[in-house]
Image (cartoon, rainbow, N blue to C red):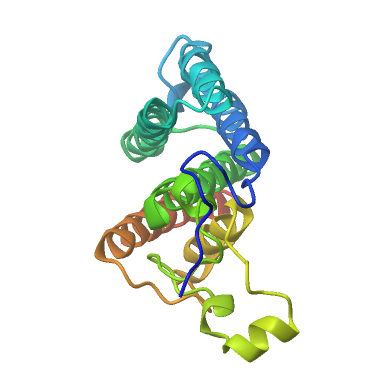
Amino acid sequence: MKRKPPADEEIWQPEPRWHALIAVAAVGGLYSALPKDLIIEPRWLFPAAVFALLVPTVVTHAKKYHRMNRLLGFALNALLTVGMIASVVLLVFTLPDKTETASELLISAGLLWFTNVIVFALWYWRLDAGGPHKREKTVGHANGAFLFPQMTLSPEAKAETAQEEWSPNFVDYLFIAFNTSTAFSPTDVPVLERWAKVLMMLQSVISLTVIALLAARAVNTF
């Protein structure tokens, strides 16, 4: 039976948030590095909007306004997703008229591909088992949308490997997202919830679109 901290605000082991902060900043940077025909002008608009949502998200977490923090987190993820999908759509419609060199096209493909990985990692991290705040309120991770290998260990094996209190953090979800974009599957982490399956299918479609449309065109221009 899982143990819980004695009070709602007492966290057993706070989950580090700096991984996610770096990821959000990385998406803003990757977007800014895209060519002008793949972004919504002016170039500073999207990074500024991300920063405008990121600051109150950090503040509400520090102040323990968990409900507001969760809502702001969803809004921030939605903004990142809209920006990425808009760039992919612009890519689809502008690719036939592109005159960039092969190396420039491959760089654009790489930027969009990595953006796709990070954005969906943020969604998995935000949604799994109620989000980071709910996960860190419970000692040990036993329920969620993803069946991590640590969750399948016997009590004896968990004790021997010091995994009794293991809980996933952002890096674990980044690993899932990376595998989904490369292998089009979660590899060693089975998916249990339908919402996660839908998101992973969407991520795979976007990854395949970027690879098939942009990278293939770049190779053909050599």
Q: Is residue 102 above or below residue 40?
A: below
Q: Which residue is located at x 61 percent, y 52 percent?
A: 12
Res 116 visible: no
Asked whether, in this view, residue 182 is left or right of residue 127, the answer is: right
Q: Is residue 36 above or below residue 77?
A: above
Asked whether, in this view, residue 213 is left or right of residue 182, the answer is: left
Where, quadrant-wise, is the N terminus in this rendering? Answer: bottom left
The answer to which of 98 and 145 lies nearer the viewer is 145
Residue 42 x/y as whole percent: 46, 9
Res 69 visible: yes
Residue 149 x/y as whole percent: 56, 79
Asked whether, in this view, residue 171 is left or right of residue 152, the answer is: right
Q: Which residue is located at x 74 percent, y 86 percent?
A: 160
The picture quadrant where one finds residue 219 is bottom right
- In the rendered image, the residue lying farthest to the front is 6
Total number of numbered discs in the rendering: 0
Residue 166 x/y as whole percent: 62, 67
Residue 56 x/y as whole percent: 49, 17
Q: Which residue is located at x 55 percent, y 19 percent?
A: 59
The picture quadrant where one finds residue 107 is top right
